[in-house]
Amino acid sequence: MKIAILGTGMVGATIGSKLIELGHEVCMGSRTADNEKAAAFVAKNGPKASQGTFADAAAFGEVVFNCTKGEHTLDALQQAGAANLDGKTLIDIANPLDFSNGMPPSLFVCNTDSLGEQIQRAFPGVRVVKTLNIVNCEVMVDAARSGGDPTMFVSGNDAGAKAQASDFLKTFGWNDIIDLGDITTARGTEQLLPIWVRTWMATGNGHFAFKIVR
């Protein structure tokens, strides 16, 4: 499958590399076609990797992973272009983190709205699925790195898109997947970030995840 990765940071590079390892073709998008981090990603991952602008990547991908920083997400998606995104599953991993007052960050949207909902409103033709935003990038692509069999959530309005996202999660080792409901339920998973950050700060260990015990 052809997959777009929007964002050149650690999350995008980790997910993109794992997807290539699984046999997919990946185009990493950024603001400029010659981004140095994207070039390093391509050099590392070989012929199944490519790079371009956000619009180039979005046009290339059958599925899009949003790995941008939350504060830049809507701008990046505007650059990607609705025409390149419409009808596609967009797996949204970003979080609305506000570091303006240092650590720990707060959320610039919460309670009555979420970044996932903002994306869906701005791009009504896109099938937005919120998931993977509650763990670090190494655990995202290898659930067992958490030390157990953790739980991952999916939120979105489109059942088919959530099923497609869940298929990706399973290839990343996530066996326990809970569908929380429509995109408004992304408020809950985005609000898990403060406790994730506090746990990481308290333990110094980012390789953990949440488990729902029934």
Image (spheres, helix red, strand yellow):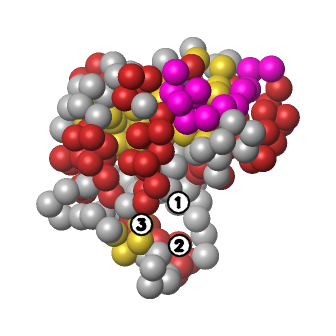
Q: Report whether 96 appears left or right of 4.
A: left
Q: Distance from label 3 to label 1 (Cα)?
A: 19 Å
Q: Amino acid at mark 1?
A: Phe
Taking depth in this image into account, of 87 and 33 the one nearest to the observer is 33
Q: Report whether 61 appears left or right of 75.
A: right
Secondary structure at badge 3 equals strand
Mark 2 lies on residue: 200
Q: Choose mark 2 or mark 3, whichever is in front.
A: 3
Task: Measuring from the top left, give residue 127's x and y in whole percent.
Answer: 31, 28
User: Are the residues flagged by discs 3 and 1 in contact, CB closer than 8 Å?
Assistant: no
Q: Report whether 154 appears left or right of 175.
A: left
Mark 3 lies on residue: 97
Instruction: Provide the residue span drawn in magenta.
Output: 47-59
Mark 1 lies on residue: 208
Q: Choose mark 3 or mark 1, whichever is in front.
A: 3
User: Are the residues flagged by discs 1 and 2 in contact, CB closer than 8 Å?
Assistant: yes
Q: Distance from label 1 to label 2 (Cα)?
A: 8 Å
Q: Amino acid at mark 2?
A: Trp
Q: Residues within 10 Å of mark 1 (few under 14, many from 20)?
A: many
Task: Tell me which residue sits at (46%, 71%) in the image.
Answer: 197
Classify 42 as above or below 187: above
The verdict on residue 134 being magenta is no
